Amino acid sequence: MSEELEIIEAELVPVVEVPAVRSETARAVRARKRYLLVPFLFLTVALLGGLRIGSEKSEFVFVRPALFCLIAAAMLMMLFFRAGLLRLDGWFSEDFSSLKNVANGGVIVALFAASAQIFNSLLPEAGLPFWVIGFFFFWTLWNNLFADFDTMRLIRSLGALFGLAFVAKYLILMNLTAPAAESWWQGILQNPTQEGVTWLLSLPRYSGATGYIQFFAIGFYLLGLFLLDPDTRDE
């Protein structure tokens, strides 16, 4: 008996490593976000946080952060590590290359600079309001160091704290500040109460555009915290 052989025509199709390609693409996207976008946001905050607009000639005024701003930023960094927003072993490790450790260090430095400038932005420049709002900042950060926080709860808490400080400085205190007049006597004649409050509280006179700039600075800072990776180890 003769056996009939059935011939099947087929075509060889190469196997494409789709998961590997997707993994490399996702890793590249995370690297660009971590080392380009996030530092750009924090450095922008570091620039805008000290920027003020003069009320008389609309000139740019750069205010350096007070020593308290650096102390508050250091406390906030400790809070980040304690709440799990950042993991120390996930950002600095002997298993990482020297370049990666240096790059991670640059991101942390940018975060610290932005944190210091955020406090510089929200604290009044001088006088009694500086010490009052500064005390509330210090008391809140000190209590939070001993509280239980997760990442999203910490970001929401900071958003509420910064929002309240923004309202106190740029909506309340700034409206109490007397506008720049041609002379001190003219300010007393036009609005003596506002001129007296400005003198007693040592409130500087800035343009209303300063509030808009600092509003965006706070938004960029919170966005950078949201995009920040707690761990930089690649899977």
Image (cartoon, rainbow, N blue to C red):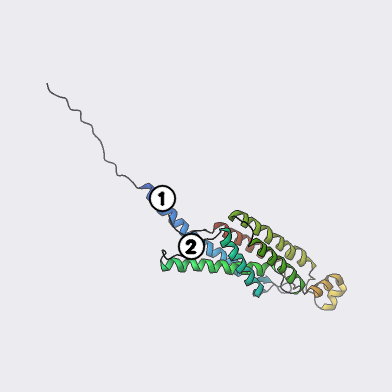
The secondary structure type at the circle numbered 1 is helix
Q: Is residue 3 above or below residue 49?
A: above
Disc 2 or disc 1, which is closer to the eye?
2
Image point 73% across, 61% down: which residue? Answer: 167
Quarter location, residue 65 = bottom right
Asked if the residue under mark 1 is in contact with the one under mark 2, i.e. CB atoms within 8 Å, the reply is no
Label 2 element class = helix
Which image quarter is the C terminus in? Answer: bottom left
Which disc is residue 89 wearing? 2
Instruction: Find residue 164 and report its horizontal and vertical position in percent.
Output: 71, 60
In the rendered image, residue 183, in percent from the top left (x then y), is placed at: 81, 78
Residue at the (63%, 64%) spot, across then down: 217
Residue closer to the observer: 215 or 93: 93
Q: Quadrant of residue 42?
A: bottom right
What residue sits 37% from the left and 47% below the top?
A: 18
- Alpha-carbon distance for marks 2 and 1? 26 Å
Q: What numbered label is drawn on residue 22?
A: 1
